[in-house]
Image: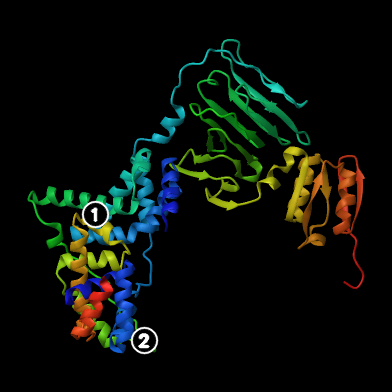
Amino acid sequence: MKRDMHKIVGRYLSGEANSNDKEVVEARRKESGEFNDGIERLKWYWELKESAPVSTSSFKEKLKVRMRLLPDYQRANVRMIWWKVAAVFFLLLSLGSLFYTSFYDARDLGMAQVITQAGQRSQTVLPDGTKVWLNPGTRLAYDLNKWGDTRDIQLSGEAYFNVTHNEKMPFVVNTQGVDIQVLGTSFNVRSYEAEKRVETTLVEGRVLVSLQEENKGVILKPGEKLVYSTQDKGLDKSRIDPQAVLAWRDGKLVFKRTPFSQFVEKLEQYYDVTIGYNPEDFVGIHYSGTLDNLKIEQVFEVINVTIPLNYRINNDSIQISVIKRKNQ
Amino acid sequence: MDNRQYSDLKDRIYENDTLALERLVDMFYERLTTFAKSIIKSEELADEVVMDVFLRVWQNRKNIKKIDKIETYLYVSVKNIAINYLKKERKTEFDVLDEAHITVASYDHTPEGSIISKEMLNEINQAVDLLPSKCKLIFKLIREDGLKRSEVAEILDLSVKTIDNQIAIAVKKIAETLRIDLSVPSNRSGIQLFLLTL
């Protein structure tokens, strides 16, 4: 009996007491103040925790080096050769108006590419049925010789992909040293070289974003955005509202507390204009709102509601200035 | 960490997510190296053993979904790899549990108003340190690493009954140190206890 009480208390302290154990301990605690006091002190000791957690960073660095020495399963998987599809290649179908396809060599099928200029947006369908929406200043290309064995796309700029599901052939977007691998899914990639980063936003399904130089990958779930900085090689994952990122696809510009300088950059890119302003006048000003398929003149009328400003449009260049409020 | 989160981590590792592996390292590194150290008795080798375990997890990630309990799996892997290291070194069979060198956490922090004095805490530290190695290891895995009795049984290849007995020994020792009487004093309560257990 004595030994049993120790077992019961042992389970009680470890948080594994069954209902019988609990009854026994609780009854005894009510019965004897001394016992109750003893249990309290045992619990106090049992629940003591060591404070400082051990740092794992140097171990993780070593681990990453050692992982690179392992046979690389991941790339092997991507490059796996599936049965050869008959060498029939479809030309790009374009639903937008601005694109061209080029073949470099008669024997070599060469690269197929779609390019949008600044201020132009386009939509296209790839041979596998994947729909792609291209933002201004975007180049999308793929190797016609390899297409069909693989679905590898090169991207520079911003595009939204609605990928046709094919479990046997991963769809891979390759951009600025990053591979984004998917099966069937909808996602957005923003990868303008000038911005020195690659932003991947997942709307549906699952994608694996991996860095070509390093043995490193991150899985994204719907509503997650991964930003890879090509400058400091940093990865940052956050949750966002995918609708905001995707709005451009439908001709909308969505801003949520966007700093004025970024707001202007987006307008310049979208409308292919240059906007002149004195940054000091707009320090601390953010813009929130949706611009739904507006002409550039209308844009400034809309902004005027929240940020009072003067604007002068002269062909492709626009000059704006703040209307200073009195007494403020 | 609940099962759903573990299974999410497994899914991500299966799909080559290195950040998920790093998360696993963050969660288990400290506990696993301490466990490895208690078997292999060397800090550097313990680190090497744990490195091996995580590398194997990564290398075999396409099978990771078959692992039912990742927590237990990691401990068992550490144990097996550590024993293999030792076997290579000594070329003899030995009993890990009886030879284990376990350092249990000892505490000296007793804030104002603590129900246990600093002297008492010292005494407990010493008493626990003097427990037989098998008992100490089990006690540590349960109390410090937060493992379940069934998990410890699986890791150490023992029965849950043995785990109960060993924990009882530790509890008894600590209770004695704190001058706590856990025995059931009279027949009356003995009967009451008996009735309660019915």
Q: Which residue is mark 2?
A: B114
Q: Residue furthest top?
A: A107
The dot on residue B154 is 1
Q: Is residue A270 left or right of residue A313?
A: left
Position of A216 relative to B126 (above/below)? above
Placement of A262 over or under A34, stated as above or below: above
Q: Is A320 above or below relative to B130?
A: above
| B144 sits to left or right of B177 | right
Alpha carbon distance from label 2 to label 1: 36 Å
Q: Chain of mark 2?
A: B
Quarter of the rendering occupied by the N terminus of chain A: bottom left
Q: In the image, A299: left or right of A17?
A: right
Where residue A186 sits in the image (x, y, percent)?
61, 37
Identity of the residue drawn at 20% across and 56% down = B156
| Residue at image point 39% right, 35% down | A73
Disc 2 residue type (three-letter): Ser
Give the image location of residue A62, x and y in percent: 35, 51
Residue at 71 percent of width and 22 percent of height:
A100
Q: Is residue A93 visible?
A: yes
Tell me the quadrant of the picture where the C terminus of chain A can be found: bottom right
